[in-house]
Image (spheres, grey):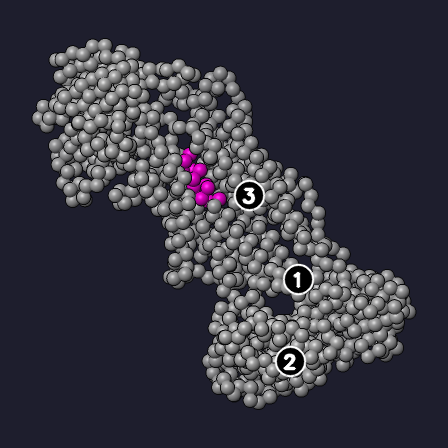
Amino acid sequence: MIGNYFKTTLRSLLKNRAYSFLNIAGLATGIACASLIFLWVQDELTFNHNFEKRNNLYTIYENQTYDGKMSTFIATPGPMAKALKMEIPEIKAIARTAGSDQLLFSLDEKAITEDGSYADPEIFSMLKLSFINGDISNVFKELHSVVINATMAKKFFGTADAVGKTLKINNEQEYTVTGVFNDLPKNSTFQFQWLAPIANIDHKFPWMQEWGANWAHTYVELIPSANVTGVNKKLQHYLTSKNSGTKTECFLFGMNDWNLHNNFTNGKMDGGRIEYVRLFSIIGFIILIIACINFMNLSTARSEKRAKEVGVRKVMGAGKGKLIAQFIGEAIVMSFIAVFIAVGFIYITLPAFNNLVQKELFIDVFEPVHLIYLLLIGAVTGLLAGSYPAFYLSSFNPITVLKSMKLPAGAGFIREGLVVIQFSISIILIVSTIIIYQQIQHVKNRDLGYNKSNLIYVTTQGKLTDHFENVYQQLKQSRVVENASLSDFPVIQVWKNTDNYSWTGKAPTQNPLISFENVSPQFVRTMGMKLASGRDFYTNSTLDSNSVIINEAMAKQMGKQGRVGGIIRDVGKKEFEIAGIVKDFLYNDMYAVSTPLVLYNKIIGTNVLSIRIKSNVNLSEALAKIGAVMKVNNPAYPFEYKFMDDDFDRLFKTEALTGKLAGVFASLAILISCLGLFGLAAYTAERRIKEIGIRKVLGASVAGLTGLLSKDFLKLVGISCLIAFPIAWWALSKWLQNYQYRITVNWMVFAAAGILAMLIALATVSFQAIKAALSNPVNSLRNE
Amino acid sequence: MLSLQHISKYYQVSGLKNFVLNDLSLEIDEGEFVSIMGPSGSGKSSLLNIIGMLDEPSEGYHYFAGQAVHQLKEKQRSALYKQYVGFVFQAYHLIDELTVYENIETPLIYQDFKGSERKAMVADILDRFNIVGKKDLFPAQLSGGQQQLVGIARALIAKPKLLLADEPTGNLNSKQGEEIMELFRKLNKEDGVTIIQVTHSEKNAEYGSRIINLLDGKIESSKQL
């Protein structure tokens, strides 16, 4: 029996090529699209799954309170790890890393900047890092030892054994490679290429020993039986016992939440990437449903042609159950053909998709998870898509269909309903795409308070800072550089902050978090910032060591003292005079308003050299000239520069991705919907061919007939608009709430989306309508 | 074999009953070959559909092979139908996507015959109807007469006791029609299949053993040949 169905299905597919194409293409596109999304979701959900102990691993986070609001930070005091290990028995192991560093590694002529961290050796067992080479228990025995990953080992030593060889770090100190570990997978939080003993930092920076400075990341492995709530309770006020007067609280942040729940609002976990995972999963299912709806629509629309078969089979004794089984079976056969084609689509589009989402997703049909998924999606799609047509078709009364070939009314309404659902979803996606795009553009075009174009920056290494004056003169002499300055950070970020400033009139309850940064005197001019009042720094910074420039937000905080000539005191009660007030500029959060900031005219510790290139010079020539200057002054270091606008764009990665994906999905949803609409229009035209013939004989024009046939479909799109607009408005307003600096939703967007959907639908339908209207009435009427 | 008593079939159109069959009673014995005639709209096809249990009468009693059909449930009726009745249509109604062989085999599938049995039965009937050579062709590749032959073979494959034919020669030329009628006569005489056919043709009607004339849903006359 199944063989019989299979044969009928295949022959009927081959016989109705256009219909089969529309149906399978729609389904395959839907499945491919949903599968790509699910691959992405799988990747996000299995983040950090390479770490066996992930259920017992935690980071210690701090909740710091400023102006009554809690902010969450990953940095913790250096001495904390050792103390905790002794005081909390539930802690099986604890390790620190000193953030993440880009250091220059060199071997003879070869010099490459690599990401990595200084860390405690406990990290190896906690992460169960797999070593290719080296004695894991001894790798950090020597202070100047380093472990590197396989890729890095290959870069420097090729196929030779790296262990025992030396690499120079930052052109200062030789480190011996004591181990080589396997590369960490891309979907893990840790992406270090190298690790070196944290003792190097402990020695170098005194603040690593202070309870008041937050410098290290502290990772904890609990014993499996530990009570996490209990440990959290011990941690909550732990810092107060070491550093009385601090209100900062600590808590454990589990590794399983690192990727998806990394957002904190007022000290509590509050969403994060999980929201995007949810959103995209929903979109994946929606696309699948749109494709299934298409299938249902096309199948029922074609039912007129199959009615006879149903009648004959019923007369020959087929029960309803057997017919339902047959039609669902057919749908499943088609959906598996679609799955097969979809796998091809996925293989073809995966590189582009990976590029879009910046991941290394892969599909392997022989991997059990993927195989089961494909089988499942084939079966589910077939069932879902085939169910309604199966019940509908099998319900035909054989006498009616065999005699008059006319179908019972009723299915038309459901079909129209399904089209409305498809177009509603499509319109929602179109509106979303436009609004997300508008929001990104809105923020990108925002007045940043500085000019980000033609601006590059270099992370300086070695002694360059010491003879900056010299470098500055040479850069200026190159005639391609307009200005240059040193600062702690690239201008779009400032990561040093404190609440320890004071001024006359500061209320005891007032403790805002204030960012501060050391800059060279050219900073404000190089960035193209504007002074609201006062003066810029003196070029001779020694004359200006007691002056600061603050931003307007800081001036506002300081009240009466927030003026040129006002006095501000740092933690050591040292007084600084406000020389100038710079207009607010944006850093860290492009969606928010500026937070208070203090700039010092000091170059100690600064390691970012920003260079403004003249706008009228050839860029590559300019870069070559700058590179030459850098080479002379910093011979051992490669000239590695970054463009500020690239960095700026990177801040919108998630939003841009959401926007792009919404765009891609909107196009696909429209495409699939149009395939269905096309089929439906063909069906309607066929059904009304006699009416068209009669009208033509009576003198109707082609244009009039086209309008007549298209009108009903446009009505459906109109209804879709009515359904889609409120939903889109609600969802997008909610999304925009996430951003302080945001657009207001404009009704024009809805009008545009509605008109776009109408036009696309019209183009799809009118093809069939015109074809029908042009047909010769003699042919259509003769058959009756 | 079957008995219809006071059968009526009507459609309600804006409160008025529109009678297709009006208080009709009819007995048919096993082995008969009955021709039903009458003008268009006299209820011939409706009568045939009710006899074949494809349709239900609005009123009346219907007995078939000793069972009260009007009291049976859908499932039982369908089982009875499968066991006893074969149907032949004016428009052949073969499934276009299936070959001659597969078309004939289909009823057996629905009656849960085993694969090997089906093979034997289809081979047998192909042989009897002299269409072995056409078994792998599709309906569209056959002439009307050949298609109807396949239609009849399909109706007979499960060895029904009753063959119902709704204008079986309506779409055929006279020579093809004659062949089909000869076949019916042979089936009736040699195999003892009870046949009820609806026809417009006097000549074809005379192949039967009884002619029933319908008019406005009632039996106008009945003539034993």
Mark 3 or 2, nearer chain start:
2
- Which type of secondary structure does the marked residue at label 3 adopt? helix
Considering depth in this image, is A722 or A352 the residue closer to the camera? A722
Instruction: Pinpoint residue B64: horizontal percent, then vertical percent.
Output: 20, 26
Amino acid on which disc 1 is placed: Thr
Mark 3 against mark 2, which lies toward the viewer? 2
Amino acid on which disc 2 is placed: Met
What chain does badge 2 belong to?
A: A
Q: Residue at x 52, y 54 (%)?
A: A281
Do badges 3 and 1 share one subunit? Answer: yes
Asked if A165 appears above or below A44 in the picture, the reply is below
Q: Does the magenta stretch include residue A295?
A: yes
Residue at the spot of label 3: A426
Mark 3 or 1, nearer chain start:
1
Packing grade of label 3 (10 A; few <14, some 14-19, many >=20) is many
User: Extreme bottom residue here?
Assistant: A142
Q: Which residue is drawn at 49% across and 34% down?
A: A416
Q: Which residue is drawn at 16% across and 44% down?
A: B116
Do badges 3 and 2 share one subunit? Answer: yes
Residue at the spot of label 1: A265
What chain does badge 3 belong to?
A: A
- Which type of secondary structure does the marked residue at label 2 adopt? helix
Q: State the separation of the CA atoms marked 3 and 1.
A: 33 Å
Q: In which quarter of the image is the N terminus of chain A?
A: top left
